[in-house]
Amino acid sequence: MNDQIIGWSLGVTETWGGWAPGGGAAAADAVAEKLADNPIARDRVRATVLAIDSGAAGLPGIGLQFGVWVPDRASGEVHANMAMELVVGATTAEDYLKMVRKPPRDRQYKVFHYDTAPAEVVVGPAVIVTRARADRKTKLVTNEIEWTIFPPGSSEVIQMLFLTPVAAFAQAMADESVDMANRLSVTLGQAQ
């Protein structure tokens, strides 16, 4: 477990658009053009990209990729978003699964659903955490799926968080998350 993740690739489908964290302003037009068919829909996608990117400034972790899922090009409605980050100093998938079995206590959120499960993806073993929770201040309910992927031989892991505020999109987002987790590829080695 001495190798580091020195490269990664996330093959996204035509309904996903992505950009590097902090690069939302530069990427917003291209993401909107890729995912939407008309000016109003492109404006909606562009605004979401900018909001996600600016809202994530200063978050802990090493951000690798943000993404938005827009299955309907005509509306430009963002059904879900994704944040992918590199986590350093990781444990094993088995130990991590034990650590996340119970939801952490956080007075900011009311938890409606919380579940964990082991999984296997192309890159290696993974742990899936699913949760539905409401922010006590804003009352916003979100459905989340968090994939923590453990490439064999690496001291680092990739974590992918998928989020939607619309319960009706949760199952479709779950299906998309499985596809995305299996499209991930990583290159291990020693950082130069």
Image (cartoon, grey):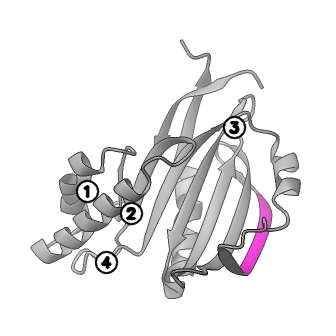
Q: Separation of disc 3 and disc 4 at Cα? A: 34 Å
Asked whether the beta carbons under mark 1 and mark 2 sit within 8 Å of each other, the answer is yes
Q: Give the range drawn in magenta.
A: 112-118
Residue under numbered circle 3: 151
Indicate the amino acid at tag 4.
Glu
Q: Is tag 2's residue or tag 3's residue first in the polypeptide sequence?
A: 2
Which mark, residue 77?
Answer: 4
Disc 1 packing (10 Å; few <14; some 14–19; many ≥20): many
Indicate the amino acid at tag 3.
Pro
Q: Separation of disc 1 and disc 3 at Cα? A: 29 Å
Using the rendered image of the protein, determine whether residue 164 is visible from the camera's viewpoint.
Answer: yes
Q: Separation of disc 4 and disc 2 at Cα? A: 10 Å
Instruction: Label 1, secondary structure: give it.
Output: helix
Number of on-image labels: 4
The chief SS type of the magenta part is: strand
Quadrant location, the N terminus? top right
Disc 2 packing (10 Å; few <14; some 14–19; many ≥20): many
Which mark, residue 31?
Answer: 1
Q: In which quarter of the image is residue 112?
A: bottom right
Indicate the amino acid at tag 1.
Val
Q: Separation of disc 1 and disc 2 at Cα? A: 9 Å
Residue under numbered circle 2: 68
Q: Is residue 170 left or right of residue 107?
A: left
**What residue occupies the far top of the structure in this picture?**
192
